Image (spheres, rainbow, N blue to C red):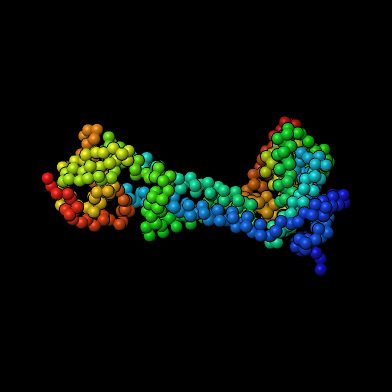
Amino acid sequence: MNNLKNNILGKIKKEKIQPIPRVVFFLKNFGFWAVFGASILVGAVALSLIFFSFSSIDRELFGRPHFPLFEMILTTAFLFWLILFLLLFLGALFGIRHTREGYKISTTHLLLGNFIASFVFATGFLFFGGSEEIEEFFIVRAPFFSHFEGQKETWKHPENGFLGGEIRSMEREVIILRDFSGKEWRVFTEEIPDDFWENIPPFVQIGERIKVIGDKKSEDSFEAEIILPWKRTPFWQGEKPKKNFERNLPPLS
Amino acid sequence: MEKTPEILAVQARDNPDIFGEIIDLFQDALLRYVLRLGNFSRDEAEDIVSESFLKAWKNLNDFDDRLKFSSWMYRIAHNEAISAFRKNRSRGAENRVDFNEEIFGNLAGKIDLEKEISQKMDSEKVQMLLKKLPTKDQTVLILFYLEEKNYEEISDILQMPGGSVATALHRAKKKFRTILQDSFSSVK
């Protein structure tokens, strides 16, 4: 057996094998815990987007026959975050098992700790307006995220009574709307109560995005029942203040 | 003052000769453990232990001195053995060990089974039955009953939470008992 010892020591000396510096192990441990921290933050973003999606569903949609609640939820950006969170969490779990102390924590405790921390951050994001800003930030800055803009999917179905797009021009009772495929629609507003036109909400302006609930009348015309702002707000924030729209209207012919 | 393995590990960081003392302290225990894990010839087991010591030398700065050094050393040897075992299996090699391990004969008795059963079985038979268990169950039984490690040491060796060790041991004992009883019934 002394041969074993001599062989090992001989190899160490001959090949000048040195112990790996301590800093390498420190960085490795730190790296795995950092990935775990990142998974908490990503989980918080995913959760806050879920909370935001649920808390800002337009009340007018409930009870509609074609209201695609689950389609809307599944196509929102949170799904992307959720997948990213799961990947990071699994990576962190694997890594933490190999850190100095990490293996002593059970998977259940790690998962629970991660979820609770994510939940706390998510609630913070939601109440301080972070969720909305995070979603907007990514949709505006990263074109890739526009595919995950869940509510866009909901409002691409005029045949189901949901039409979304950008206002190109307006006359009293007719709004010209460009949908997300670039097609222009004439949106008639006779069904909308008169006070809508008397107190035009600020979101009804040329260049703004809106959502319209109503009926498709022909290949390029739509009868509006309700017009909603594109921007969603959580239910506890109430409606945005309205302002007189008359000054924005082009002169009646 | 007596030099504990933990003290030696700290001193060995700058001195391979002190590492030699660590090799002296652990080589027999590790060789026995690797052989108990099974499916290795003595030469293969020596290679595994040798690789384990080299790995320990390279990773000496990763040793957490809050741990027992023996647990850390067993962990490295365990991982090396499992990795060698997988390589062997992927090659389709069947290197069943032929070592005479008298302690295996007492394993059934240690797990509180009827003496009748343990007496009717020789060590080779118990060893064979042990091999029917999944590697994780075998390992935990070997560490607890044969290597006489406590829960905390097993937790550090297998890098699993302390609570999971108790569960794994309970499950392994149950499986081993079933296998033994089935085997005994077939003998009757």
Q: Is residue B33 above or below residue A238?
A: above
- Is residue A63 found left or right of B72 in the rendered image? left
- Is residue B135 found left or right of A38 in the rendered image? right
Q: Nearer the viewer, residue A64 or A178?
A: A178
Furthest residue toward right = A2
- Is residue B6 found left or right of A134 in the rendered image? right
Q: How many marks?
A: 0
- Is residue A55 found left or right of B123 in the rendered image? left
Furthest residue toward left = A253
Give the x, y percent position of residue A200. 19, 52
Give the x, y percent position of residue B69. 74, 58
Q: Residue at 80% of width from left, 64% of height from top?
A: B3
The quadrant of the image that shows the C terminus of chain B is: top right
| The image quarter in which residue B156 lies | bottom right
Q: Nearer the viewer, residue B161 or A143?
A: A143
Give the x, y percent position of residue A88. 53, 49
Give the x, y percent position of residue B17. 83, 59
- Is residue B141 visible from the viewing direction of this image? no
Q: Nearer the viewer, residue A29 or B121?
A: A29
Q: Nearer the viewer, residue B68 or A86?
A: A86
Q: Residue at 74% of width from left, 51% of height from top?
A: B55
Q: Residue at 15% of width from left, 52% of height from top?
A: A198
- Is residue B97 visible from the viewing direction of this image? yes
Q: Residue at 81% of width from left, 68% of height from top?
A: B1
Furthest residue toward bottom = B1
